[in-house]
Image (cartoon, grey):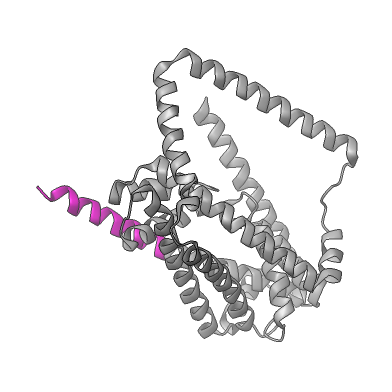
Amino acid sequence: MSGIRNTIQYGLILLATGLLIWFSLRGIHVAGGGNKWDYLVAAWQHAHKGWLVVMAIIMIFSHWLRAIRWLILLEPVGFRPKVRDTFLSVMVGYLVNLAIPRGGEVSRCYNLYKLDKTPVEISFGTVVVERIVDLICMLSIIAFAFLAESQKLFAFVATLPIGAGGGTSRVIVIAIVVAILLVMGAVLYWVVNRSQRVKNFLNKTWSGFKGGLTSVFRLKNKWPFILYSLAIWGLYFLMSYAVIRAFPSTSVLGFHAVLSLFAIGAIAMAVPLPGGAGSYHVLVPQGLFFLYSIPKADAVAFTFIFHGWQTAVLVVVGAISLVITSLLIKKVSKVP
């Protein structure tokens, strides 16, 4: 049953992604009824490839810093793998995320276990800490963006179809969610109390997870962790700036525009779709068009190329990391 449920869930995610991408492509209106894909190819050909290469370098470097920051969290719980291993695991995680939303967090922990034998439950606890810190950084940037461009961004949010349906429907949805959670909690409690093996497994897993989760409070020097976190998100911002400079229609935009689009992109990427595909293709063009009067076709082309280029880099580097991981594991297994 769980396999069928997962298949249906994944199918719905892909369907939603496809529908959102199709909806975004409708924004391209080519004069004379020309082909939309030809328009995207032409936009790619006119893009400044140097800026796109700069974006790719910045992105890879930000992931390298993320791998180093992960080491800082693993050290207080008694594990210090090589930076090479944490970087390979981070990139494999991003590769998995493109196929399975939020699956990369677990897969990179398993990848690190295969390379360095760091227990999954411990490393996953540190990943949760990372995600909490990243969420704080993202919300801080979004808040700063709304302060800097409050009038435009609040007007943009007002155009989105959120909160529709009235208060009554929201109360019903919340009640259903709470009921489902209560039933799931009762079933889980019953299963755990019936099996000592399950109880022992959960106790062991929770012990390791708690150790990883509290690792940030045992850091001897918290400043490197804070500085790495700020640097990672600063590099994400520079990625957006580099891509905006790569296209003739957006290269005229200034700092505030980059900040606004970065905030909109961060919100879009937080939607649980593969690599933010679909949500990114709808929200970012709408922001470019509504906030900065970029022609809708150019805005859609910009978004498709930006997201496509970023995805291509992740696929290539992630696939290489997966191959290197396999070779390293085989090499270790041959050692007597």
Give the residue at the far front of this rendering. Answer: 220
Residue 226 picture location, percent across and down: 53, 64
Camera-side residue of 45 and 288? 288
Whether residue 33 appears in magenta in the rendering, the answer is no
Q: Quadrant of residue 305?
A: bottom right
Q: Residue at x 32, y 62 (%)?
A: 84
Left or right: 185, with 330 as reference point: right
Between 229 and 219, the one lying in front of the other is 219
Q: Is residue 232 visible?
A: yes
Up the image or down, 226 lies above or below 43; here it is above
- Which residue is depicted at the point 45% across and 45% down? 212
User: Residue 119, percent across and down?
Assistant: 35, 42
Q: What is the number of callouts on the image?
A: 0
Q: Which x, y percent locates residue 238?
A: 58, 76
Residue projecting furthest to the left: 336
Indicate left or right for 37 with 291 as reference: left
Range of residues picked out in magenta = 317-336
Q: Is residue 143 above or below residue 332?
A: below
Q: Quarter-wise, where is residue 11 in the image?
A: top right
216 lies above or below 206? below
Task: Look at 77% across and 77% down and name the residue there.
Answer: 295
Residue at 40% x, 31% y is: 204
Q: Is residue 335 magenta?
A: yes
Choose between 204 and 106: the one closer to the eye: 204
Residue 112, horizontal then vertical, whole percent: 35, 50
**Is any part of residue 35 visible from this angle?**
no
Left or right: 223 with respect to 75? right
321 lies left or right of 221? left
Chief secondary structure of the magenta portion = helix
